[in-house]
Image (cartoon, helix red, strand yellow):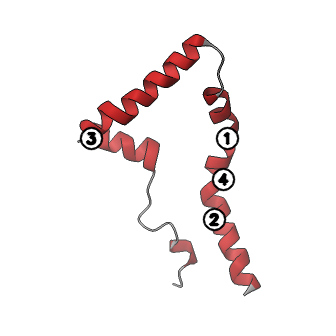
Amino acid sequence: MPRALRRYEHVRAARTRPIVNSGPRIARVTTARSVSVRWLRDTAFWIATRIVPARANGFYRWLLNLVFIQARADPHRQLRRP
């Protein structure tokens, strides 16, 4: 059991590391004091939540998958037995 748990922790850490590492950048953007940075942030979120999903075909769908989702077919495939 401890070996399986260590393996799971290793696989999970590899998957979550990019999100954890982006924490400081996300904090800078979400707590920005600059009016221009806040405007850019708010505009980007508005576009991402209203315009892009409505037109999510072709290029936009590809962009959503690349930037926001980065989905893999099976996020636990490294944990499955061969």
Q: Compute the Cα span from label 2 to label 3.
A: 30 Å
**Residue indicated by mark 3:** 56
Q: Residue at x 37, y 28 (%)?
A: 47
Q: Is label 2 in a helix, a strand or a loop? A: helix
Residue drawn at x 64%, y 60% as measured from the top left = 14
Sequence-wise, the earlier of marks 2 and 1 is 2
Q: Residue at x 63, y 13 (%)?
A: 34
- The residue lying toward the viewer, choosing from 42 and 77, is 42
Cα distance in 3D space between marks 3 and 1: 27 Å
Instruction: Read off the residue under disc 1.
Output: 23
Q: Tell me how far mark 2 sits from mark 1, CA to CA.
A: 17 Å
Q: Give neighbour class at mark 4: few <14, some 14-19, many 20+ (Cα, 10 Å).
A: few
Name the mark nearer the viewer: 1 or 4.
Answer: 1
Does residue 16 appear left or right of residue 61 in this picture?
A: right
Q: Tell which circle, 1 or 4, labels the residue nearer the N-terminal end.
A: 4
Q: Residue 12, labelled with which disc?
A: 2
**Which residue is denoted by mark 4 in the rendering?**
17
> Viewed as shown, does residue 29 lie left or right of 56?
right
Q: Which of pointers 2 and 1 indicates the residue nearer the eye?
A: 1
**SS state under label 3:** loop
The numbered mark, 2 or 3, whose residue comes first in the sequence reads 2
Residue type at numbered disc 3? Ala
Residue type, numbered disc 1 = Gly
